Image (tube, rainbow, N blue to C red):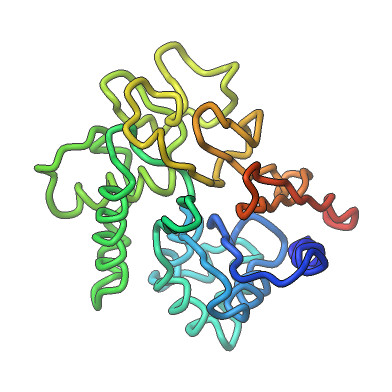
Amino acid sequence: MLDTLLERLAERGPIEQLWFVGDLVNRGPDSLNVVRRVRDLGDRAVTVLGNHDLSLLALACRPDAEQQASADLRRFLGAEDSPELLEWLRHRPLMHSDPALGWTMVHAGLPPNWHVAEALTHARELEQALRGPDYGSFLHALYGNTPDQWSPALEGIERLRFIANALTRLRFVAPAQRLDMTYKKTLAEAPDGLVPWFRARGRVNADSRIVFGHWSALEHIAWPDHNVWGIDTGAAWGGPLTALDLTRDTPELIQVAPDPVQA
């Protein structure tokens, strides 16, 4: 499906950049070749990390990684070029913004009380830790649902855990702008008090156009009233694979149908 979509995009004319909203791995039948394909695009590809990408990096640090991995990820970890691919993945950003184009990309979302510039600063903090020499210990301590509320006074792993959860796992926020890391389904079935991050009252990043992935259960792609477009259309679950042309005044969707062999 990825190859078909890239061919469809190439037919439209020269492409200066291709943005990937993350989760290159563990959301399809061939994580290994997806990462190879995107890596081989070179500087034309801008890829942000998703929660599944971080999970693979954490898994790869375990001595029993291949025993704990799914069949697809076991194939990835057993490949001759796996160390090189993991190193490439580890050095991807957590967030990307292009002021000239007027778009920001993140895997999951932004806390309502973070301006885009502030979010970029926090993303760089996480990237620095991920690219450091002790990244294995860092990844081991990264997982958990707390703290769920931002404070500039947060320090150490708790600060980095909040940043990671916000950028790679966020869907809903609870009262007092707390991140909810438990509910993952549709808006219609959401418990009382939860709102999608982009509908939160007083969202300070509402004037920035944001494209994200992560949320395959979201009912719509375009939320122009909120300046957000969510392009995870559930290709892993039999839906189409979606691209968005960000160079147009009104973003245009380009989609490919599921591969009947894999559906």
> What residue is drawn where x is 48% and y is 42%?
209
At which x and y percent is residue 75?
64, 74
Task: Left or right? Give the position of 67 relative to 40.
Answer: left
Residue 263 appears anywhere in the view: no
At which x and y percent is residue 139?
32, 62
Q: Is residue 38 above or below residue 40?
A: above
> What residue is drawn where x is 32% and y is 38%?
145
Q: Residue furthest bottom?
A: 80
Q: Is residue 159 above or below residue 229?
A: below
Task: Tell which of 7 and 153 is nearer to you.
Answer: 7
> What residue is drawn where x is 72% and y is 61%?
29
Q: Residue furthest right?
A: 260
Task: Tell which of 97 and 112 is nearer to you.
Answer: 97
Q: Residue furthest left?
A: 153
Task: Tell which of 188 and 45 is nearer to you.
Answer: 45
> What residue is drawn where x is 58% and y is 40%?
229
At which x and y percent is residue 68?
51, 62
Task: Left or right? Give the position of 64 relative to 9.
Answer: left
